[in-house]
Structure formats: C-alpha cells, structure tokens
Image: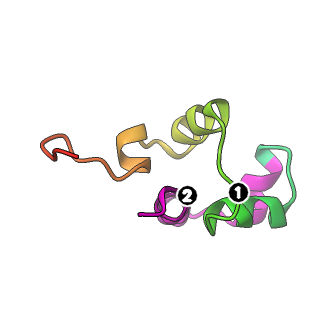
C-alpha cells in the first residue's frame, strides 16, 4: 500500500470538488504548481503542518485524506 499515492489522490479529489486548480492551491501554500503536483502524484510526502492546513483548506478530515473508515480495522 502506497500511502503517499492514496493521500495524493484524495487531495486531488478534494481539490477538484472545490473547483480549485493546482496553481491556485500552490499559490495559497506558497509553492510552485510543480511542487504541489508532486504531492498529488505521491512523489513528495506532506509534513504534519501541511496535512493540517490542507485538511482545513479543503474542508476534509485527516481520516478522509488517509482514506480511513471509522469502522475499518487496519
């Protein structure tokens, strides 16, 4: 299981649901579009602050970001 790919895919889904472009989100988070794209593609991993800030910005929970279901046992 590649967590970075799962998280990146969920970021992409949440971003698109808000109607945001990669460029817009990258600008908000003070990075280039290419850097943000690497997060969405699972090439780069987010740090704790980035996870927290992205969840708030995209109105999602960390469980949604990591694709964790409440009743699912790992």
Q: From what the image shows, is residue 48 above or below residue 8?
A: above
In primary-sequence order, the first of circles 1 and 2 is 2
* Disc 1 target residue: 44
Name the spot of residue 40 as percent of width and height, x first.
Answer: 62, 64
Q: From what the image shows, is residue 70 above or below residue 40?
A: above
SS of the residue under disc 1: loop
Say which quadrant the N terminus sits in: bottom left
Residue in the foreground of this view, choosing between 48 and 15: 48
Q: From what the image shows, is residue 35 above or below residue 45?
A: below
- CB within 8 Å, label 1 to label 2: yes
Name the main secondary structure of what is drawn in magenta.
Answer: helix
SS of the residue under disc 2: helix
Count of marks overlaid on the render:
2
Q: Residue at the spot x=63%, y=69% of the render?
A: 41
Name the spot of residue 26 as percent of width and height, x first.
Answer: 78, 54
Residue 7 is inside the magenta segment: yes
| Disc 2: CA contacts within 10 A as few (<14), some (14-19) or many (>=20) | some
Residue 15 visible from this viewpoint: yes
Residue 68 is inside the magenta segment: no
* Disc 2 target residue: 4
Name the spot of residue 8 as percent of width and height, x first.
Answer: 55, 61
**CA gap, disc 1 and disc 2:** 7 Å
Q: Residue at the spot x=81%, y=60% of the render?
A: 35
User: What is the span of residues highlighted in magenta in the rendered image?
Assistant: 1-27
The numbered disc on residue 18 is none
| Disc 1: CA contacts within 10 A as few (<14), some (14-19) or many (>=20) | some
């Amino acid at each position: 299981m590649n967590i970075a790919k799962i998280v990146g895919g969920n970021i992409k889904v949440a971003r698109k649901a808000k109607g945001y472009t990669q460029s817009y989100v990258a600008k908000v988070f003070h990075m280039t579009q290419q850097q943000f794209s690497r997060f969405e593609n699972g090439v780069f991993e987010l740090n704790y602050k980035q996870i927290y800030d992205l969840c708030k910005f995209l109105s999602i929970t960390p469980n949604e970001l990591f694709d964790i279901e409440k009743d699912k046992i790992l």
